[in-house]
Structure formats: structure tokens, C-alpha cells
Amino acid sequence: MPHPRHLRVARIATLATLSMAILTTLVMPGAGLLRDGGTTRQALAAIGILAITAAQAGVLYAAVTPQASSRALARLVTVFLLAAAASVPLVAPLAGTRWHTWAWVGGSVLATAPFLGGRWLRIGTGCAAVAVSLAVGWWQGAPVAYAVITLVTALCVVAVNGLHVWLWTLLLEAESGRTAQARLEAAEERLRLAGEVYDLLGRDLSVIALKAELAERDPERAVQEAADLHRLATAALARRAAADPPA
């Protein structure tokens, strides 16, 4: 079973691998900045590239962070989708056919789609990334090049990250199973103790009932029997208290 320390190491390794996807989103489209002479286009594209890179980093970080709430992940996914949509007008004009800049962004969006939550959201985002890449490619006069770059980029990123993310998921499932097994063993131990206490209480109650009957029949022995009853009841309560699990 994985130890929590091993989980921390595995998570760091997974994040390090996912950082390659983030660098791809930053560096590959960013190369278009060097191939464009328009200052305004470069500034707008830089904003779009930084925005989609930061949003992607947030989604990937939350996806491999068990402590992240579903609400926080939903917010990050929303920010990512907005950044992806904003990147189209901001980044697509950069460098034209000299670099096919948005094709690299589309590949990153497609590669990030598996981390976005629901099945239809993942499918819809992936299809939208391909469709937008084809549309931008058609506008730039190179739809085939855009489609190829987008698909190949996504496949390469998924190939590099897929195994690590899959292993991380298996480790989380194993840790969850270990925790469930520990809880089951604790519950079984409590049931065993409860059974023993039940048996002891049943025996004590039988003796108490017998002594009460004797005291009722023989008043001369009532004091002695009452003392025995008190002793038995006190011992039964002590065993009951000892069997209670600590809070």
C-alpha cells in the first residue's frame, strides 16, 4: 500500500511532468512573437498566451490535488475556457502562416480537455479546439497545417503525460482502498468487542436476576444479595466502560 510520503513524491513527479505541457503552451505559441513585426499584435498575443498558460496551469494543478474542491476546479475550468476563447482573437493573427501560432494553442487546449471534468465537457472542448483550429487555418489559408499541428501537439503532450497521470490515479485509488480497509478493520474490532460485552452483560444479568429472586424469597439474605447485586452491576458497568472505543 502507498505511504502518504510516497503519494507526495508521486504527486511532485506528476506535476513536474505536467509542467512540460504548460511549457509547450507558453513556448511554442510564444515563438510566434519573434516572427511578427507588429508591436500591437505582439502585445495582444503575449497577453493571450500568458492567460491561457496560467489558466492551464491552474487546471492541471487542481486535477492532481486531491484536496482541491469540485467548486474550485469548476472555477478554474471556467477561467480556462474563457482564456481559450479569448486567445482566438488575441493570438490567431500573430505571425500568420509563418508560424501557425494558434494551432499550437489549439493543441494545448485539446491536450488539457481530459482534465476538465464531465465527459461531455471534455468531448465538447476537444471538438471545439479542433474546429477552431480548422477555422483559423482556413482564414490563414492553411487549414491542413493547422489541423496537423493541433492534433500532433495534443497527441505528443498526452503521450508524455498520460502514463504519469494514470499511475497517479492508481496510487490515489490504492490509498483510498487502504483507508477503507483500515476503517473496515476498526469496525470489525468494535463489533467483536461489542459481542464480547453483550455476552458478559447477558451472563451478569442472569446472575443478577437469580440473586434478586433469592433475595425476594429469603428476606434474611436480602442484605447479602443486595451487596452482591451492587458488586455485579458495578463490575458490568466497568466492563462496559472499558469496551468503549476512545473518542
Image (cartoon, rainbow, N blue to C red):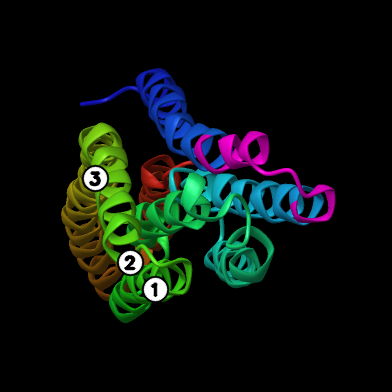
- Whole-Å distance between the Cαs marked 1 and 3? 44 Å
Q: Position of residue 36 (x, y in %)?
A: 67, 44
Q: Which residue is mark 1?
A: 138
Q: Secondary structure at mark 2?
A: helix
Q: Residues within 10 Å of mark 3 (few under 14, many from 20)?
A: few
Q: Nearer the viewer, residue 86 or 73?
A: 86
The residue at 45%/50% (across/down) is 63
Q: Residues within 10 Å of mark 1 (few under 14, many from 20)?
A: some
Q: Secondary structure at mark 1?
A: helix
Q: Which residue is mark 2?
A: 143
The residue at 59%/49% (across/down) is 95
Q: Which residues are magenta?
A: 28-41
Q: Position of residue 115 (x, y in %)?
A: 39, 57
- Whole-Å distance between the Cαs marked 2 and 3? 42 Å
Question: Is there CB contact under 8 Å for labels 2 and 3?
Answer: no
Q: Which residue is mark 3?
A: 173
Does the image show residue 176? no
Q: Is residue 221 above or below residue 213?
A: above
Mark 2 vs mark 3, foreground winner is 2
Residue type, numbered disc 3: Glu
- Whole-Å distance between the Cαs marked 2 and 1? 5 Å
Mark 1 vs mark 3, foreground winner is 1
